[in-house]
Amino acid sequence: MSNLFEGHRPLVAILRGLKPSEALDIGTALVDAGFGIIEVPLNSPDPLESIALLAKEFGDTCIIGAGTVLSAEQVDGVIDAGGRLIVSPDMKPTVIKRTRERDGLSFPGVFSPTEAFGAIDAGCHALKFFPASLHGPNGVKAIKAVLPPQMNVLAVGGVTVPTIGEWLAAGTDGFGIGSNVYKAGWDAEKVSTEAKAFVAAFDVAVV
């Protein structure tokens, strides 16, 4: 497993819609289930507050950050709140550059080889193929074949417990898991159940 993920499973919990009042309960459920990378999209309610709470509680042992980061100014906001991971739905060199300048981890969203190589040239740490469901495992595999072998590729969008093994077999390095592990309004018990299922499926597939 790449040291990019700092010893954690390459599973990113995407908590779109998370409220600060539930951040620690949901974060605890995820960490206890085996997730070590947590992303709060910036189109969630008061996202920087949630990121600050999660970073203070789990930042020493987990990777905390934001998704739907669209500008260099937003990068600064996330880093200032204690986050390190910067995930975008698109590929903006200015966002990647600012993330590197602030010692963050840049996971931009790409869909085509052109976007992938643009992100690599801009200095990203890993590529987020989004929406991965439109490529499928074989599509991601085909694009990854032409990328630098050390570049990690994450599939985001459409990855499920039954299919995670298929994605791994195709060479996908990691995953962003959104509505299959958290939906706005889910309590910690529900999140724990879904998160444990993903962790178990991942562990079985990588054996």
Image (spheres, helix red, strand yellow):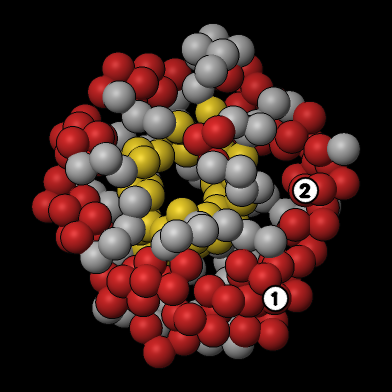
Mark drawn on residue 202 = 2
Q: Is residue 73 left or right of residue 188?
A: left
Instruction: State the SS at label 1.
Output: helix
Where residue 37 sits: x, y (%)? 52, 55
Quadrant showing the C terminus: top right
Image position of 30 with respect to 131: above or below? below
Q: Quadrant of residue 120?
A: top left
Name the residue: 79% across, 64% down: 197
Name the residue: 69% across, 82% down: 190
> Which residue is more in the foreground, 114 or 66?
66
Where residue 99 sits: x, y (%)? 24, 40
The amino acid type of the residue labelled 2 equals Phe
First of labels 1, 2 by sequence position: 1
Name the residue: 66% across, 32% down: 1
Crowding at mark 1 (Cα within 10 Å: few <14, some 14-19, many 20+): many
Image position of 25 with respect to 152: above or below? below
Where residue 119 sits: x, y (%)? 33, 25
Q: Is residue 49 left or right of residue 146?
A: left
- Residue lying furthest front in this view? 60
Q: Is residue 144 left or right of residue 53?
A: right
Instruction: State the SS at label 2.
Output: helix
Q: Which residue is mark 1?
A: 192
Q: Quadrant of residue 67?
A: bottom left
- Residue 44 visible in image: no
Q: Is residue 132 left or right of residue 169?
A: left
Where residue 126 sits: x, y (%)? 45, 32
- Residue 52 visible in image: yes
Image position of 115 with respect to 189: above or below? above
Crowding at mark 2 (Cα within 10 Å: few <14, some 14-19, many 20+): many
The amino acid type of the residue labelled 1 equals Ser
Name the residue: 61% across, 67% down: 31
- What's the CA distance linking mark 1 and mark 2? 15 Å
